[in-house]
Amino acid sequence: MNETAWMTTQTADNFFMITPMDTSHSRAITEVRMAYDQDNLYILVVNYKPIPGQIIVESLKRDFNFGKNDNFLLFMDTFDDKTNGFSFGANAAGAPWDGQMNDGGSVDLSWDNKWETAVKNDAEKWVWEAAIPFKSIRYKPGITEWGINFSRLDLTISEKSAWAPVPRQFPSASLAYTGVLSWDVPPPNPGANISVIPYAASRITKDFIKERPSKINADIGGDVKIGLTPSLNLDLTVNPDFSQVDVDVQQTNLDRFELFFPERRQFFLENADLFANFGYSTIRPFFSRRIGLGTPIQFGARMSGKLNKNWRIGLLNVQTAAQDSIDPKNNYAVFAVQRQLFSRSNIRLMFVNKDALNFNAEKYEGISRYNRNLGAEFNLASANNVWTGKMMVLKSFTPGKSRDDLTYAGDIKFTKANFSWQWQQEYVGNNFQADVGYVPNALRMGYHKISPNMAYLFFVKNPHIISHGPKLVTNLYWDKQLDNTDREFILSYNINFINRATIIPYVSSNYLRLLRPFDPTNLGSFKLEAGSEHQWKTAGIEIVSGPQNRFTYSLAGSHGGYYQNGKRTSFRTELGYRFQPFVAITAAANYNNLKLPTPWNRTELWLVGPRIDVTFTNKLFLTTFMQYNNQADNINLNARFQWRYKPASDLFIVYTDNYLPENFMVKNRAIVLKFTYWWNL
């Protein structure tokens, strides 16, 4: 703080409280200073401690859980469009946070880039300082004003605050409520902006079931990031390797549809929203995890970013090899363009193409030679974010499916501090197909859906409770003949405590008519007949503790009916304990007891996942976890060591075992050594 640059810099202070109430200034005192030179944007933040000597953090893990750490975050709207931007920050022990912002307030923490950060603590305050290279962010050339906000969470007094006031019903990241960062002259041009990110990896694998000898593979490849302009980026990849990606957290699946797992691979992450956010969570024409996890990617190119304040563009082309003689080689191409409308709304067009190369109809029976999706959507966001919504239409093109291949949907949402409501409506045609998308409900073979939701909160003056109120969620489906196939009503009552703990009791009512045979245990055994009807009621409760204690917990339990007049009792919990700030231990368990008539009888499903995160420093990490899943008949053990020896450059050592649960026989084993380096030219 005593450096000359900081002594002469303007200070942003006098923060406003967001939670527990948004009607006063913050009790936690925060001071922010910013400066820049030709290469970097600098920030220095002094976070004075309301309780001297006290901080609450989970660990030194990068991109930490926001609600479990004292932290300071910076949100920058570098195009002044109140829609897209960047977020940087740290928790009170020095764990860094960085993400790309989209949709006016969402932060994608999978995005990672090169920058410098440090935190220092004493009894009265914790101080964060960072240097963010202009090469690491995208911004509009010549602009002299950015939208900006600073957010602080202090769990010792259960308070969230921001420099520019934000209504409590919205996240502090909401770009509709930023202040202004004024530049004396436009930010400097980053100049030649090329990053080369090579990798070298070696892996040893052994298949014990097939009794094959160990295999040793070595790979090299990498990515290149080229800043075509300060706001437009070109990503290139050759023989990419994704071995550093975290193992997916397994889930017990008692649904009729596939589960969703998020994308974590670096090549797909910059401006990911432009490609991945088209549509709804269950109507996506593009889902990048369809590419390269079953068949290796040979090469790819991806251009994305801003042309100017109003226009964004995205182009992607990826070529995959054939995994075996069953699948052909595929080429994937995506085009997306977005035009800003009004203050914060936009319209978007997207085209997705999958082409099978060297296609042979007899050899690749059951596989379409091509699948294409063409769509348009309008995204509504009012200036104050109170009104949001979407309207979209998609058409697919698939050989032999030329009729009823449309999908359209829309929703409108109104959000105030104590009252919110939403209406959503969908239609998916019988022949709509999205091979590169995520549309699990399309298995209903064409449907209409409406989903009206409503919630109300009563704010009270109480030393422990801040608000409480009911919430109603409804999902109704009809087939093409307008006969009802699914009804779901969920009535809950939300109790929100000042210390951020929550209690939510609920009741639900379900009815469904199966459109295809289904095994209610998802174990691959006997199936219920298509056309059979089932209905049941359920009661349950969810409890989440406040994050202030070293021991934290979440509990959820339910009991009610199930398919074929059966019964289902479910219980899940997550228990955590932290040895602040170096070790975080988590134990998660999910139990389902299904009582069904013959031939299923009683089925017990367990999913258990203890995990230990050791963060020696904010650059040296060891994560070890086990996942026991008797539905998948597997025990997975994974240990990952990561050394971030330079910003965005890593050394990984990953060890993975898979076992049979009944006798702990090893099914397969892998050891991976990987080295990456981020080199700015």
Image (cartoon, rainbow, N blue to C red):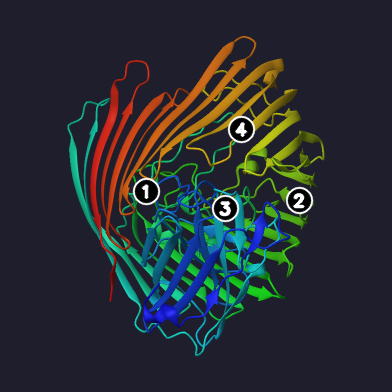
Mark 3 secondary-structure assignment = loop
Q: Residues within 10 Å of mark 3 (few under 14, many from 20)?
A: few
Q: Secondary structure at mark 1?
A: loop
Residue at mark 2 to residue at mark 3: CA–CA distance: 31 Å
Circle 4 residues within 10 Å: few <14, some 14–19, many ≥20: some
Question: Looking at the picture, which amino acid does disc 1 mark?
Answer: Val
Closest to the observer, 184 or 419: 184
In the image, residue 176 above or below residue 401: below
Nearest-to-viewer mark from 4 and 3:
4
Q: Which mark is residue 399?
A: 3
Labels 2 & 3 near each other (Cβ < 8 A):
no
State how far apart marks 2 and 4 are (Cα): 22 Å
Judged by depth in the image, the label closer to the viewer, 2 or 1, is 1
Q: Which comes before the other along the chain, label 4 or label 1?
A: 1
* Of callouts 1 and 3, the N-terminal one: 1
User: Tag on residue 444?
Assistant: none
Q: Give the Cα separation between the discs numbered 1 and 3.
A: 35 Å
Local crowd at mark 1 within 10 Å, few (<14), some, or many (≥20)?
few
How many discs appear?
Answer: 4
- Cα–Cα gap, marks 4 and 1: 27 Å
Kindly identify the amino acid type of the residue bearing the numbered disc 3. Pro
Contact between labelled residues 1 and 2, with CB atoms less than 8 Å apart: no
Query: Can you tell which of label 2 and label 4 is closer to the viewer?
Result: 2
Q: Which mark is residue 424?
A: 2
Q: Nearer the viewer, mark 2 or mark 3?
A: 2
Q: Residue 58, image x and y in percent?
A: 44, 45
Nearest to viewer (mark 1 / mark 3)? 1
Q: Amino acid at mark 4?
A: Arg
Q: Is residue 56 above or below residue 3?
A: above
Left or right: 83 in relation to 99: right
The residue drawn where x is 64% and y is 69% is: 164
